[in-house]
C-alpha cells in the first residue's frame, strides 16, 4: 500500500504536467496569458485533490491486488 506522502507526490507530479497542457490549451483558445495561468492554477488545485481522493479510494478496492496468504513460513 502506498503511503499518504507517496500518493501526494504522485498527484502533484501528475498534475504539474497536466496543468501545463491545460494552460497551453487555454492560451491557444483565449490568447490571454493571464487567463491561461489562472485556468492552469485552478486546474492544478482541483484535480490534485481529486486525484488524491481517487488514489485513496482505490487502495480500498481489492480488484487486481494479489490475495494475501493465510499463513507464512
Image (cartoon, grey):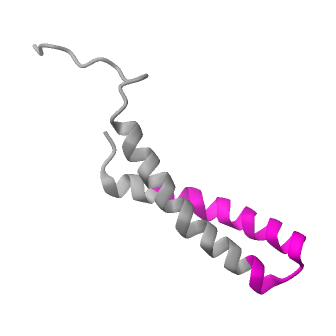
Total labels drawn: 0
Residue in front for this viewpoint, 19 or 71 = 19
Is 53 left, or right, of 18 in this rendering?
A: left
Whole-percent x, y for residue 30 in the image:
87, 76
Whole-percent x, y for residue 72 in the image:
12, 16
Which picture quadrant has residue 34? bottom right
Whole-percent x, y for residue 4 in the image:
32, 54
Is 12 left, or right, of 61 in this rendering?
A: right
Magenta range is: 10-36
59 lies above or below 8: above
Which picture quadrant has residue 31? bottom right
Q: Which residue is drawn at the image coordinates 70% and 74% (left, top)?
A: 39
58 lies above or below 41: above
Secondary structure mostly seen in the magenta stretch: helix
Point out the residue furthest to the bottom here: 34
Locate the N terminus and report the quarter of the image it occupies. top left
Locate the C terminus and report the quarter of the image it occupies. top left
Q: Is residue 6 magenta?
A: no
Q: Which residue is drawn at the image coordinates 56% and 60% (left, top)?
A: 47
Q: Which residue is drawn at the image coordinates 88% and 70% (left, top)?
A: 29
Q: Is residue 18 magenta?
A: yes
Amino acid at each position: 500500500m502506498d503511503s499518504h506522502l507517496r500518493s501526494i507526490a504522485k498527484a502533484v507530479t501528475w498534475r504539474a504536467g497536466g496543468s501545463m497542457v491545460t494552460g497551453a490549451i487555454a492560451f491557444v483558445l483565449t490568447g490571454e496569458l493571464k487567463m491561461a495561468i489562472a485556468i492552469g492554477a485552478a486546474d492544478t488545485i482541483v484535480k490534485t485533490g481529486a486525484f488524491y481522493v481517487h488514489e485513496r479510494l482505490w487502495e480500498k478496492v481489492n480488484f487486481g491486488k494479489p490475495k494475501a496468504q493465510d499463513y507464512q513460513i
